[in-house]
Image: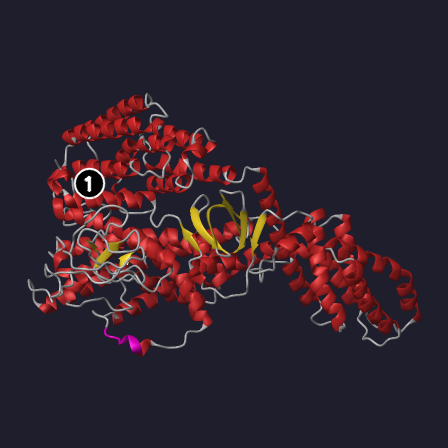
Amino acid sequence: MSTSRPPAISLQLARETRERFVAATETVIAPAALAIRERLSSLAAQTGNARAMQENRDDFLSFQGQASNWVALSQASWRKILATSTGGNTQNSLSRLELIGDEVVENNILSSRLAQLIADKASFELNDLRLRIQHLEGTSELDAKDVFKPETLAKLLVEQWLAAGLTRAMWTKVQDSIQVKLVEAVVKAYKDANAFLIGKGVMPEIDLKSFVKRTGNAASGTMPLGNGYGGAQSSGPGPAGQYGGGGASRGMQGIAPPGSFAPAAIGVGMGWGGGAGNSQGGGQEGVVATGGSPLLMARQRAQGVLLNLKRFVSARLGPESSSGIQHVAGSGAPGGGYANGVMARGAGGASPAFVAAIADAEAAYQLASSQYVVGEEATALQQTAADLRRRTTELKKKAPTTADKATVEIVALMFQAILAEERIPFSARVWFARLQMPVLRVAIAEPEFFGTLQHPARMLIDRMGSCVMGFDAAAISGSALEGEIRRVVQVIEQYPETGQRVFKLVFDEFVAFLGKYLTQSDATQRVMSVAQQVEQKETMAIQYTIELRKMLNDMPVRDEIREFLFKVWAEVLAIAALRYGAQDEQTVTLKRAASDLVWAASAKPNRNDRTRVIQDLPKLLQRLRQGMTLLGIIGDPQEAQIKIIGATLSDAFMSKTEAIAPAKIEAMAQRLANIEDFVSDEGTAEFPIDAASIELLLGVDAASIEVVPDTGQKVGEEMLAWAHELQVGNWFMLDHNSRPSQVQFVWRSDRKQLHLFASSDGRSFLIQAGRLASYLQAGLLVPAEEETLTVRATREALAKLDANPERLLN
């Protein structure tokens, strides 16, 4: 409990903060409903196939009828949770063990995405608020259902969505609209809550030392607990809060708040090991995030680097509102900490004179770097590093505030690390170096550059870095990829006043360029074409099978005919639609053959029907043979199918099968003719694929393609999500059939079921989604880089600052 005020007053402050937070977030639910309605209205107005249009109209009408109900339920439940919120997590974890149903898991998946987005956008504010509330209530952690936890609000909104009679599928359609409205308001509510508590004198400055776990075994009396990230477990005592060591296995030990709001993040320290073995610089250990997917854990580790930087600078500079360093809490009131990045400034923004000085330094460096001679790498790198260091020193002298000085130094150290990255070919490194001044401009104007991994400037540098670090210098020099990097940098230099907008623009353009550049070879184009056709064919075959099952559900059709239609003819229709088009005359004829076969296989009690069968049977059998030939079923297998069909038709001729009303046959024919209007992606998550099917079905030599199909093994949703989020251009180490290969991810199919990786020796790996997820889970496909380029550069910059803190301002 707070020692500076009576316990009752502290608890009252905590309650009032929660009430203010709930009141602020409650008001955004109705605007979110309006945004959802607009989104569904837009979807309902779109044109497409009949089924999709009908679903969109149904969703719009459904939400129209239930929107007010969802808003009311959500607001009432939100206030109810407030009434039951208490300080501390008093529930025993063992008492919560229970079997979880599929519906609960699916609901949690929906809500966790929203919760994670909130946590990502407000990580600093969340942690600061949590520490202040724990300080007031004298607890070590918030209750699992505390209103301050992003999971609580996200879960409530999903639960009340379903309680109002709305569907998960509809939530998925509109979740982007929900996020846009909700995240901004919730982040502001966290800022306002911190500002309110600071105004009441609650921890204006957060003393991190009090949150370090201590043990008598450490020589210094302190040692954070846990394992170093990157798979290495550090050993030995080390001072808390130290960023020590050097090289790839550096263990950078910062202080991360215990019980982070981010899902599954725990602990008081973060260790960053680049490889196996003990870390240097004291061998400190850090507590790792547990219980999440590797993708989530990697993001938490990366966010931890930014958090450590924030804490370090905050501890060194302190709250200096007179120098322009202010706590961002809605109103810009001075206070402790740096809530939205390393440093945040007041409404006045950066000094115009200082901005002009950066522009002058940028122009001078552009001129100097344009004279570097490609081929004299060592000399040119030395010139680049010395030039940038000199300009950094000059800019720090002109910086009007301590915040500006610190920003200049941190950005400079980051780019020193990038310039020293030997895996980036020299010709590309020169262009990366030219981004230092544009990034400095952005960092001065937009402090969130230091606080979020999603800043466009970071995303651009990371994406370009992830691509070029897999190529050798010869492959990059003079290539279209080098030309695109040069163009990107020059565009950024041409628009100095646009801030992160120009970075976002060129990032999108670079991603689009990668999609073409990585698939430009004839061999890759051929593989892509084959893979896309296979996915389309298999997807359509599954869709057609589903529709045929629906059509025959209430018809008395022999099992032999059903099996032929489901297992053979559905694929025939898919191949025909793919090759000729869904409404091509050949495809229409094959569709009609299905209904003709069902009619021919039904009982024929009168002479006219039997006469018609005798007349039409040769044409029907010819169409069936034509379809099976198209599918690759020829010779004896084809004759076996015809024999089974012939026996069934003979029974029908003698009325040994059941009769089917002509109206039903005609309805089936009509539905088959326009079957594409009724199919959906339902049930198409998995389909069989192998090299033989590629050759047999599409007539393409698949010798150069290593097909890695699904095996039926179930993998977790988080692993599938990781597979779907892999970025084109990134490099991986693939261990397939005990043969390691360095591969680059070059293409993902439209339905995200097929993923193409290319190796430097010319081989291609076409991996199905489920198998890709299992390879990631088993460690058979490992990212070549554990950290992105800017995260690693930030970590190395922080290590240098910790070793020599005075350079931050000198």
In-front residue for pair 220/345: 220
Q: Position of residue 260 (x, y in %)?
A: 26, 60
When the figure is inspected, residue 402 is found, relative to residue 543, above or below; the finding is above
Q: Left or right of 653: which side holds 624? A: left
- Tell me which segment is drawn in magenta: 90-94
Q: Secondary structure at mark 1?
A: loop
What type of secondary structure mainly makes up the magenta span?
A: loop
Q: Nearer the viewer, residue 4 or 477?
A: 477
Which quadrant of the rendered structure holds the N terminus?
bottom left
Does 732 appear above or below 356? Answer: below
Estimate the x, y position of residue 728 in percent, counting from the top left. Answer: 46, 45
Q: Residue 515, image x and y in percent? A: 50, 40
Which residue is rendered at x = 51% and y = 49% of the image?
42
- The answer to whether residue 37 of the structure is visible from this angle is no
In the rendered structure, the answer to whether residue 100 lies left or right of residue 369 reads right
Residue 482 shows in the view: yes
Q: Residue at x 47, y 31 (%)?
A: 480
Among the 4 quarters of the image, the one containing residue 282:
bottom left
